[in-house]
Image (cartoon, coloured by chain):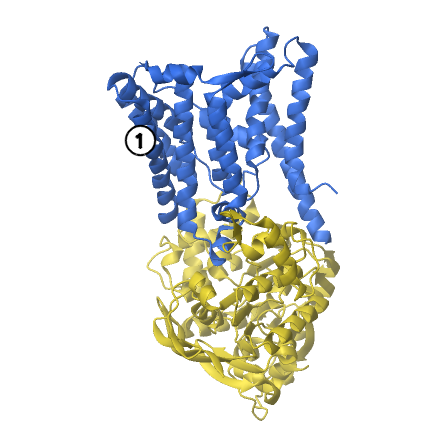
Chain colours: A blue, B yellow
Amino acid sequence: MMNSRFTSLYVTGGLFVLLFLAGSLQFDHFGSTRVVANLFTDNAFLAITAIGMTFVIISGGIDLSVGAVIALTGVACGVLIGQAGLHPLVVFPLVLIGGGLFGATMGALIHYYKLQPFIVTLAGMFLARGLATILSDKSVPIDHSFYDAVADFGAFLPGDAWVGASTLILALVVAGAVVLAHYSRLGGYIYALGGNAQSAQLMGVPVARTTISIYAISGFLSALAGIVYSFYTFSGYSLAAVGMELDAIAAVVIGGTLLTGGSGYVIGTLIGVLIMGIIQTYISFDGTLNSWWTKIVIGLLLFAFIAMQRLLTARASKEMAHA
Amino acid sequence: MSLLKLNNIEKRYPGVKALDGVDFQLREGEVHALLGENGAGKSTLVKVMTGALQGDGGSMTYRGEPLRLKSTAQAQSVGISTVYQEVNLLPNLSVAQNLYLGREPKKFGLIDWKRIREQSREVLKRFALDIDVTQPLSSYSVAIQQLVAIARGVDMSAKVLVLDEPTASLDSDEVEQLFGVMRELRDQGIGIVFITHFLDQVYAVSDRITVLRSGCLVGEFETAKLPREELVGHMLGKELQAQAHRAQERDERATGEPLLEMDQVAVRGSLQPTSMTVRRGEAVGLAGLLGSGRSEVCRAVFGVDKKSSGKLKFSGRERSFRKPAEAIEAGLALCPEDRKASGIVGPLSIRENIALAVQARRGWWRPMSRAEQQELADRFIAELQIATPDADKPIEQLSGGNQQKVILARWLATNPELLVLDEPTRGVDIGAHAEILKLIKKLCGEGMSLLVTSSELEELVAFSDRVAVMRDRKKVAEIEGEDISENNIMQAIAEA
């Protein structure tokens, strides 16, 4: 029997394959390793953010600050590297720790003051976006030999497919996240919190530490996504990644994670991001469609996935009743 | 040998003493039942002994050493595990994860799933459970989940196992299975605290019994030497005495035509087939211990819980209320048991709280004018002597008794034919208590019918024309007229 826990994962994976096949049949050059490699390169920053978001949502929370943290990280890199002339290898640890602390603070507020994650991270979003604008309200170019080296770092796979630094960083993040989710105690605690916070506490889960860690991870990964984004744009801009938190949430949901918490997979989120990317690719291959069609299709997909989750959970509880 | 000893435990909440110098002693290798009615302090005592709450006074010793518990995690780590009525495991995680959450064996710093699965199977074998441990816990029945919770507790080297109403949602086979496990654990020297309100189960499995009442210790007894009637007497605070003859003056109103007729009404999972009749102008008391099905009858009558079988007639017509609104429409009213959670709307004024039910009956598109509301409120404040300077005070600032009167007023304002009161005098001070009883009698005199649950025998005797006695979620006896006495009710509750 197919393990029902993975049903939504299979559906997500199947959908990706279907979209890819459809594109390949319709357009020349669509079905190539190059298109796939570009999917990873173009969406690495979104995928990294969405993986952080996956943990937050599995725990039953939400993090609306991620897009703003990406912008703040980009601007901070721009100011510190482009204007102050610091070396990126000095700046990166700083902004990563900063992102982690920013998230940890929100996690602490959520836990100790029993505040809604929605409102705390909404405040965090405004705060980070505002700070970014104060640092610089114009786009700050980043011109550093290290950035050029990063851009050149990588290798061509057969079929003219470029695997660069962003893709490699994403691969590391995915590997780390899978280990965290399924081979560490913290991972178990995160699923436990999302299952039932009160039970988790009675079972001895350190709720405070876990909550703070979850938002710290999300903040850290957002900062990392901000760095990857700056590799992509060679600049930092306070209005970058506006609304990206919602893309990340959409990717997590399409990836099969329940918004109510307690269930979901990192790999699902990765596929969710790739599905969003492939729709975009499809639309740019077509050439006649307005790029907003991406949003429309993603909207429809979200509806479909939420309805499917509803059905799956309803079926599960029905089976339970008959057991 | 004494395993866990609680001495002179006190716990105060604002305005109440939840525990007043309670002693409790658990020996090695025994099943010790902890009994008491609502508000007796059972759950507070359990919380103190499992570290979920800290007492304000008293001390604990555990295996001869003084013990101060600060958290449930600490209690678990010294060997005191608790299994709650609502299984407090995680339905979304696998059985194996639930067993080992927070103490997973590791290999090279990573969780060793193979070992977890093997050990889980091993542990569950002791409980005669042969299930796929990789499946989510939610795919198994409550009974299995309950056993998994116990297995987790025992495997964490528990010496003390607290089972807080573990049988509430189990069927009889599952209860037997659980009792088998309990006996086996007892024989291994584990001390089990067993909280339940099923007396049969107490006698089936426990060695000793501790009874609490109103936050005080009533006593500790050997199960084998304590007759049922005496136990019920201890729980309700009444000693069996020679039948007190009270020439009750009961008028002829009990012969009115039937208003509510229940014919084998059952609710899946909460009420066994039960028949009873309430006549016009009659007050019927519902007696029984906590969990005997009293509230369930009220809920079934009012359409809160859907009946799964049986017939319900109201005013001679067969009815099947699917929701409370239909019951209200038909002329019923219910004052629920838990005033705070399902009765009052705290921040709203007395006036608004009283007007709620009338307004709901009229439909929200025909709002009551402020003057109408005011008139209604003033009338009931005067009639029920609600102690308040004016009708605009938020209800949450009133005392328990006055809150209860406001709720009564809310339903009286709808002019119901049948008023269902679930524990109307709980948490109400003596003065208001008497007034509420007086009111019940007066309402009957005016031709209204009442169905009233109460844990206080004295009260039942005082107002009832008839008393239906509930046990194990069904009606076991009905006492009428002259025969209504505290003794008779108590005997009916205790009868095996």
Q: Vertically, is B170 above or below B303?
A: below
Q: Amino acid at mark 1?
A: Leu
**Which residue ends up furthest to the left in the rendered image?**
A84
- Relative vertical location of residue A188 with respect to residue B187 in this rendering, above or below: above
Farthest top residue? A288
Relative to the observer, which residue lies in front, B367 or A270? A270
The reply, left or right, for residue B260 in relation to residue A130 is right
Residue that protrudes farthest toward the bottom in the picture: B242
**Residue drawn at 63 percent across, 12 percent down:** A30
Front residue of B104 and B49: B104
Taking the spot 60% from the left edge, 73% from the top edge, the residue there is: B185
Query: Image quadrant of residue A298?
Result: top right
Residue B83 percent across, percent down from the top left? 55, 64
Give the labeled residue for mark 1: A94
Counting from the top left corner in percent of width and height, residue A130 is at 31, 26
Crowding around mark 1 (Cα neighbors within 10 Å: few <14, some 14 to 19, many 20+) is: some
Can residue A127 be seen here? Answer: no
State left or right for residue B467 relative to residue B80: right
Left-right relation of A314 to A72 = right
Which quarter of the rendering shows the C terminus of chain B? bottom right
Residue A6, x across and y down, in percent: 65, 39
Say which residue appears at 44% left-offset and 50% top-offset: B373
Subunit bearing disc 1: A
Q: Secondary structure at mark 1?
A: helix
Q: For residue B146, what is the image quadrant?
A: bottom right
Q: Nearer the viewer, residue A113 or A189?
A: A189
Position in image of residue B305 (x %, y %): 64, 56
